[in-house]
Amino acid sequence: MSSIGFVEEDYEKIATDPQYRARLLADPVGVVCKLFGYTPKPGFAIEVIEQAEDTIVIVIPPKPQTGANLEQALSQVADRVFDLLFSSGIGGFLIPDETRKWDVREMRMASTKAQNGLT
């Protein structure tokens, strides 16, 4: 890898290393947690969507359960967090609820500690 930042390095690896890209698509939790030096809690899930140049990716919220209060469901959906982790536009996270926001923050903290040799 070149001597560029973390985001650019990871993008470079995704773009140039077919085995890494395949592992990321097949086991996103394992790859991302290893990359960040993060040990996930039970039930932790990550979905990686491989974007095509000619495709706009739209993420829709889960369908409300039958009989659910639609106003409350709308409020929950509106409270979802789209976290642009990278201001360069390379990527980001769509965080489904408040508790998962803390998972992303813990991943970042673990990554920062690992990069600074504080693990």
Image (cartoon, grey):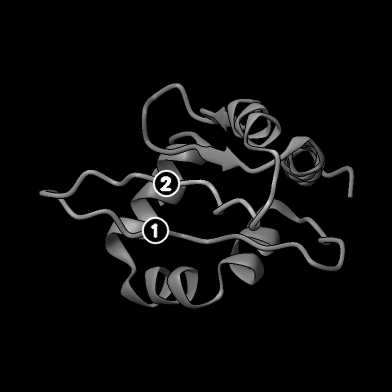
Label number found at residue 59: 2
Q: Residue at 38% x, 77% y: name it.
A: 19
Horizontal side of 82 relative to 96 (left or right) equals left
Does residue 77 appear in the picture of this structure?
A: yes
For marks 1 and 2 on the same chain, the one whose residue lies earlier in the sequence:
1
Mark 1 burial class by Cα count in 10 Å: few <14, some 14-19, many 20+: few
State if disc 2 and disc 1 touch (CB < 8 Å).
yes
**Mark 1: which secondary structure?**
loop
Horizontal side of 16 relative to 105 (left or right) equals left
**Mark 2: which secondary structure?**
loop
Instruction: Using the rendered view, name the quadrant where residue 40 is placed.
Output: bottom right
In depth, the one of 107 and 35 nearer the eye is: 107
Task: Report how many numbered discs are placed on residues in the image.
Answer: 2
For this orientation, the residue located farthest to the left is 54
Per the image, the residue denoted by label 1 is: 49
Instruction: Using the rendered view, name the quadrant where residue 13 is placed.
Output: bottom left
Which residue type does callout 1 highlight?
Ile
Label number found at residue 106: none
Q: Position of residue 9 (x, y in %)?
A: 44, 45
Q: Position of residue 106 (x, y in %)?
A: 81, 41
Which residue type does callout 2 highlight?
Val
For this orientation, the residue located farthest to the top is 87
Above or below residue 45? Residue 87 is above
Q: Position of residue 78 (x, y in %)?
A: 59, 26
Does residue 3 appear in the picture of this structure?
A: no
